[in-house]
Image (cartoon, coloured by chain):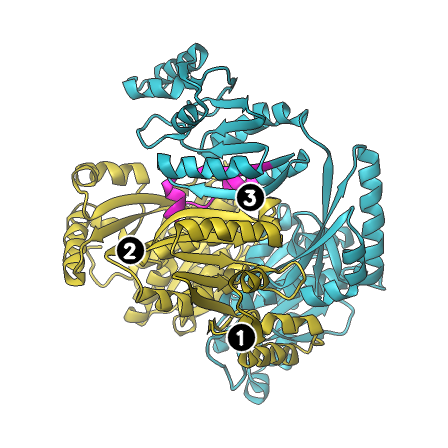
Chain colours: A yellow, B cyan
Amino acid sequence: MKGEIISVGSELLLGQIVNTNARFLSEQLAELGISVFFHTVVGDNPERLLQAIGIAEKRSDLIVFTGGLGPTKDDVTKEVLSSHLGVPLVIDEASLKAIEDYFRRSGRPFAENNRKQALVLRGAEILPNDAGMAPGMFLSASGKSYLLLPGPPAEMETMFLRYGKPLLAGRSGRIESRVLRFFGIGEAELEKKLEDLIEKQSNPTIAPLADEGEVSIRLTASHAVKAEREKMLDSAEKKILERVGPFFYGYGGTTIFREMGERLRKKGWTLAAAESLTGGMFQSHVSAVPGASAWFKGGVVTYQTETKTEVLNVKRETVSTFGVVSGPCAKEMAENVRRLFRTDVGISFTGVAGPDPLEGKDPGLAYIGLSVKGRETEVFAVHLIGNRDTVRLRSAKHGAWAVFRAAATDPER
Amino acid sequence: MKGEIISVGSELLLGQIVNTNARFLSEQLAELGISVFFHTVVGDNPERLLQAIGIAEKRSDLIVFTGGLGPTKDDVTKEVLSSHLGVPLVIDEASLKAIEDYFRRSGRPFAENNRKQALVLRGAEILPNDAGMAPGMFLSASGKSYLLLPGPPAEMETMFLRYGKPLLAGRSGRIESRVLRFFGIGEAELEKKLEDLIEKQSNPTIAPLADEGEVSIRLTASHAVKAEREKMLDSAEKKILERVGPFFYGYGGTTIFREMGERLRKKGWTLAAAESLTGGMFQSHVSAVPGASAWFKGGVVTYQTETKTEVLNVKRETVSTFGVVSGPCAKEMAENVRRLFRTDVGISFTGVAGPDPLEGKDPGLAYIGLSVKGRETEVFAVHLIGNRDTVRLRSAKHGAWAVFRAAATDPER
């Protein structure tokens, strides 16, 4: 099955936003075994959109649209498709009710043009929008399939994963992918350790990809029989983990924060964090994990020096002797936040996010303290490359990786 | 002048990377007054690339390519264009020398396939690659222009800014954009208030865009004289702000967190936050603002109920009478964190991120407490739609908006 993605929105053509939707959908469609040969971006212009649809119909079986479903006059996707296919737009009562409920709950007045969002192509399968208002649609006509999704990434992703993907899943597929995720090893090093495998192996293919301080490997097996595909993936995974297993932390779309939480949950341990460098980013990622309240108690952000001593009781002489960007400061922060929140584990972050040096220390230097009940406190010094945001994010991930290892049931890892 | 961008690379169609090149070039071309009506992404496949070129030539004057200039067999952009235009490829001696120098400096052996990178379309203007090896090219033929740029963003951006942009600058008209950012008003409501302006006005154009709980408006003026463009933008901005000024918070790529910080800085106020619902996300966004340490002291994340009473001294009877998702709890959190961190402003977040209800309250309900020295504490109840992540993000933005207004120098706003 050949698919292509048409992203509708002048903001993309003006360079106001980047087309992350096309990336997300390409990856998802690849997982479903749907080959994506083209992406097109077109503005909020009926004539040019119609042109793009005509081109796409000549070369693809499935056309996935993102954007142009909103309440404004600029939103034209379903209108253009309606006149192109000769399928009228009708009000979907369930969607209209959801939109009205939304306004009622939010206490905002219902602007009449929001009714437009409840208009759908007659006969289309409706995909509810659990993260917004405009519903999605799936329609087949003259041997082509059309999937209409909203433009805002949070709405589009939720809708696709909950409703679009299951709908398409039955329609394709002879390939299967598995993603293995690693931390604490660089892409070049990982690739070197697996060089012969990557070169010799063509089915499954082994494709490493670096992403924000971590590396993943995508295995893709092609076989008509599902059980065979699974067997091929298992065997490749085994060979890979024999070499780089100590850096492996999980599968697919998981995160190091989620896997850390899973280990804490299994141990029955609770966690608190003290953040300076990362300014709340670690805890923000941790609390984004569904069910985090079972093992994450909370923490402090001690962004200014005085808050470290006043709120977190770091000793004044520690700060004056070693500075706030130091192992001894990280150690006390981790121990003290663990005591303050009465948890099993305390983790701390202090360092230099940049762009300017701090206390004469270079941007990218971070100290991560790890205090676990009944164990000696550990401090990790890491040197990170990148701008302010990436230094913070990579530090947060390093912290999660430290907790992940500390909470291993197998003491070997 | 009509332009379009063709990005060549199978990694884009597999969703392994996001097409940031198209965003960058769109923004750059818009600045030059070149209208971009389409983006296309196509794989490393000669036949499909040729097809995409044929389509682009029918509708655009300038075609900008990114990718496919490298040393491997997969890199086919200039080869396809060479046979399509009937223009042979020839070795560019200056580029070849630069490539050989590059290998000499890096101490790596010169692999013979790197000679391929020095092949250029005969008669093309050569764009040096100061950040890599493959040179770019600019060529006009049969009334169409072709600009070939490398795929890696660092190479492409350097080459475009140093050589591509000056080359194109002479060839186009002049447009200028200004973005106005708003909070606390929906896209549909904003558009209704400005309906007549949006419809009547064609220069500057007025284009609203919704994004994660906020709305922006892009004004685009077209005129040969810069001073005239500025005047036109000023006049349109004035008309818009007369109607929706109370929701305006800043220009261009700014954020509500940054503008909040700017007002705090001007007031000489300091800020602390107490987060339950948002789990550190508010503080993470706040500390991402450069220079935040001047006015942001820190805060607490009290994710579990007991930490609210134990660490933040929220009264036990407040929790037992009203619950943690309540106005009274938000009020105490804001006041207590302000006291604990000795700041001028304390902000707090408690609510239900979802997907499950909490204390019988629906996901999306959030209470935001705002405590300012010498003022009555305020509590805002907001009802947000979306998934867990968007509820958290929109709550954090609402908090920033509350502080932004509280720190207004003009008490009317």
Callouts 3 and 2 on one subunit: no
The verdict on residue B14 being magenta is yes
Q: Is residue A290 placed above or below A41 in the rendered structure?
A: below
Q: For the magenta stretch, what is the residue range?
A: B3-25
- Nearer the observer: mark 3 or 2; the answer is 3
Whole-number angstrom distance, CA of label 3 to CA of label 2: 41 Å
Circle 1 crowding by C-alpha within 10 Å: few under 14, some 14–19, many from 20: many
Circle 3 chain: B
Inspect the image, locate mark 3, and give the three-letter code of the amino acid beneath it.
Phe
Q: Nearer the viewer, mark 3 or mark 1?
A: 3
Q: Is residue B15 left or right of residue B282?
A: left
- Helix, strand or loop for disc 2: strand
Which residue corresponds to mark 2? A249
- Give the spatial CA distance, label 1 vs label 2: 33 Å
| Residue B381, placed above or below residue A149 | below
Q: Which residue is mark 3?
A: B38
Q: Is residue B264 visible?
A: yes
Q: Of the numbered discs in the image, which one, if any, rests on residue B308?
A: 1
